[in-house]
Amino acid sequence: MSNEGVTYRIASWIADVPPARTARASALAVEAMQDAIGCILAGSAEETPRRVAAAVRRWGGGDAHVVGDGLALPAPWAALVNGAAAHVLDYDDTFGPLSGHATAVLVPAILALGEEVEASGPALLDALVVGLEVMACVGRGVNPRHYALGWHATSTIGAVGAAGACARLLKLDAPRTADALSLGVSMAAGTRMQLGAMAKSVHAGLAAKAGILAATLAAEGVGGAREALAGPWRFAEIFAGRPAPEGAMDPPSGDAALAIESPGLSLKAYPTCAATHLSLDALLALKARVGFAAEEVEAIETELPMVLRRNLMHENPETGMQARFSMQYCLATAAAQGALGVADFEGEAIHRAASRAVMPRVAMRGLEETEGAPPPSTSVTVRLRDGRVLTEARTERRGSPALPLSAAEQAGKFRDCAATVLAPAAIDAALDAIAALPQDGDARTLVRALQRAG
């Protein structure tokens, strides 16, 4: 394979970056792994991953396990199920260069493949850091246009990033890693039309499965186009409709910061679409400061970037999944109770009278954006029946690198998520297994710690 072109430059970086360099980011990788595993545990009992597991189990068993369930499947199928679980509650992190959800794809892929090849803990963390870098390279080449066109980048760019992570885990050389990336491009698919549908969370699993398949096929000598990312009919021009900016997709050189270090991952404080988070932060700050009750609210108005507003398509949600993409439901519930958690999207919770009474009073307006300019800030205005008008604006959401969740908040989120599957002692064991990854942990020990007893 030619050593020219961006695909080969990324592949060479994947194959050659010293493990000592990625290990310097291991603390961040552990945080990301913990957050993703918590989301998988919380999502594992949901209808979507259970239906996915029922569909794929007919094709036989294997060496990788469904988290929380113990079902043993071939690695691609385990990654598909666990990816759907990771993303189903929309509580998983977001990654700026990707314009999507990174670890909901990468962690299911490297856990499943890692079990199969008996990967060490450091190898898992290394693959996670590398996969994030690949997502950043591709994302810089096509976003924000790729996302604005309606592609679900978690699924499209995610497949390529997972292919790179799995190639690293399999220790492929540069030519075969380039094949893995090329094959990942061939499997990239998924649009944002699925927001609010079961298929949306399945996208993360499909991308994780694609990464394992792409790397495993490449390991067996299945080749792809020499250049898959830049040029006519290649990823950037097909998925963004124009060439990537010069040098945008190149991997870091020398000792430059890795993508997990800067810009870093944004962990979620609420189990909802990220497009609601700045508005939620602003509203909850107002409620905490002023202490108004829901019945005092005359109107709630929020202004946010149009690219975010378009995601929130369910004004009157009928399911928990739709409610995660409903600004009306999220702000009404936050106004009614001063918090928003996983239980607010389960069963009949979305039909509670307190939330439904406020929903008609919630309005949102999308703000047009100029490409290349910073996005406009998000604001919330609360009009109270006594005539008071309260306003709050936000540009950085809780959980972003600029406003990170504390270690206590991260641990609390994991415990809340894991409690749907694990007993308290098992939660402690799972946290210990994750914390051990940089030293003497391994994939099989970790996955065993994530299974429901009995």
Image (cartoon, grey):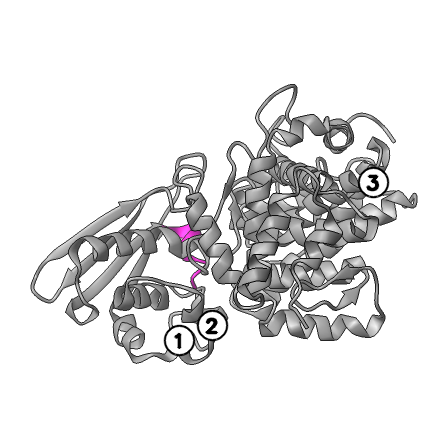
Label 1, on which residue? 350
Which residue position holds label 3?
Answer: 179
Magenta region includes residue 311: yes
Residue at mark 3 to residue at mark 2: CA–CA distance: 40 Å
* Tag 1: amino acid: Ile
Instruction: Judge whether 431 appears above or below 18 on screen.
Output: below
Query: Between residues 282 and 442, which one lies in front from this camera angle?
Result: 442
Residue situated in front as seen by the camera: 149 or 452: 452
Q: Report the residue at 72% width, 49% height from top.
A: 110
Q: Amino acid at mark 2?
A: Gly
Marks 1 and 2, how far apart at CA: 7 Å
Answer few, some or many: residues within 10 Å of disc 1's Cα (few below 14, many 20 plus, some between 14 and 19): many
Identify the residue at image location x=70%, y=50%: 159
Magenta stretch, residue numbers: 305-312
- x and y percent of residue 296 in the render? 15, 68
| Numbered marks: total | 3
Circle on res. 72: none
